[in-house]
Amino acid sequence: MKYLDLSLSEVLDLLNAGKVSSVELVTECFDRINETSDLNALNSTYKDEAIKRAREIDERRKNGESVGALAGIPIVLKDNINYLGTKTTCASKFLENFVSPYSATCAERLHAADAIVIGKANMDEFAMGSSNENSAFGAVKNPVDNTRVPGGSSGGSACTVAARQCFAALGTDTGGSIREPSSFCGVVGIKPTYGRVSRYGVVAFASSLDQVGPITRTVRDNAMMLNVISGADEHDMTSSRVSVPDFTSKLEAGVKGIKIGVAKQFFTDALSGEVRNALDKAIEWYKNAGAEIVEIDLPSLVTALAVYYVISSAEAASNLARFDGVKYGRRAPEYTDIVDLYFKSRTQGFGAEVKRRIMLGNYVLSSGYYDAFYRKAKRVQKVIRNEFNEAFKLCDVLISPTTATTAFKLGEKANDCVAMYLTDIFTVPINIAGVPALSMPCGKDANGLPIGMQIIAKHFDEETIYQVANAFETAHKEDK
Ligand code: GLN
């Protein structure tokens, strides 16, 4: 048996009992990373530093000194999260050689909890994509079937956890980038409530939608990771002051009397038969376990994808204006004047999808179109938010598929951006509403590919999500 076959929480118990050392865990991770390097999950790794830190933490533990909540656990960060002294590339040629001058708050909190960052995960460039094929450093492969995509944009984070290269990873989710790859790779990923986790030091894509969240192999591990990274941060004014509960406290509470909402707008013709069956079965299981199933109507859900592409692209165009070849990142080697410098640096530094978003964003913000697109999208966003708020008066959680199908083939949608955007049809509305949602495995299709179930709750009620998720996971352990 390998330690990496255990969950984060199991291995933490072994560490605390002195039955394994962190050095052993880190070493096992790097052996596994070498064995599975063709997955291309990681953009950089820090073996020597990780072993050194593991040794120090082992020493402190042995001496009975106090250690953090995740002491000695090897983890991975998505490559858009700054961690002092390491490269943060956003999988872009623009930032190929950019070294973090400071740590993001979420990374700092993991560091302070004595977790060991062993590397940075590959991703779609600047977190724009659903397949991880938009990386300047090559696509990531799905560890379940190497001919398929792992999902995106946190594809490397989901892949590295599913492939057992580490015990947990952080991703970011603006429209589905934690949940969709978690669904495709068969792991657990949460997009917390907007504002739950500080985004200070995380490279911005669409600031009104971006959230950081953990990807793990179990629900409990996920709650433990979220415990560490959540909470107000004076460096991020959008981080919330709402108090942070212990997310593990209701894990064993069961689902008796829990009201589970099911909205027909999540169960469209786009669903594959196998995904529909798996969800039907899961809902049936919840019913038998004592939950009450409530029918919910979310009539504006269908507009969410259009709203998302207007708002997220507008914000992306503004956020990415800072990459000009002057302050940091890539600078074109030859240019005639400052305008030419901007033009050439941006032309050479950004990939095709990023350029598409910048053009779309500047278009919807331009005078004459601002009212027709951007202002209208913001108005529809309010309608969608209200529908979710109303829904959560009738139920505790909503359950939906995370994606309409299982992982698709590498290259299958690479030249059809609308087909690619449609992958996120069930995840995007959650970011538009700002509510939390988790994706977890709920079965496999005939090819053995994981099927993902999405559990959604009202603002700041991640606790109930974990409660509902853990009940299902516990009852279906043997199916894994
Ligand atoms: N796939 C979506 C997009 O390309 C979502 C990305 C994300 O959540 N970062 O914009």
Image (cartoon, rainbow, N blue to C red):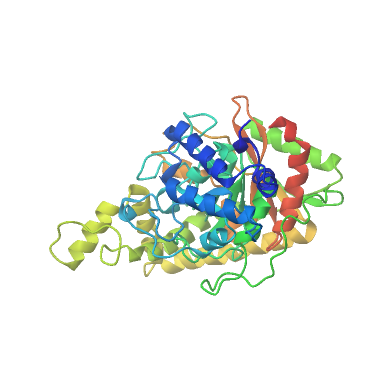
Residue 410 in sight from this viewpoint: no
Q: Position of residue 3 (x, y in %)?
A: 62, 37
Residue at 51 percent of width and 40 percent of height: 27
The quadrant in which residue 413 appears is top left
Q: Position of residue 200 (x, y in %)?
A: 49, 66
Which corner quadrant holds the N terminus? top right
Q: Position of residue 203 (x, y in %)?
A: 44, 60
Q: Position of residue 423 (x, y in %)?
A: 53, 43
The quadrant in which residue 404 appears is top right
- Location of residue 276 with respect to 313 vertically, above or below: above
Which corner quadrant holds the C terminus? top right
The quadrant in which residue 332 appears is bottom left
Residue at 52 percent of width and 29 percent of height: 145
Nearer the observer, 291 or 69:
69
Nearer the observer, 363 or 7:
7
Would residue 349 be found to the left or right of residue 370 on screen?
left
Residue 13 in sight from this viewpoint: yes
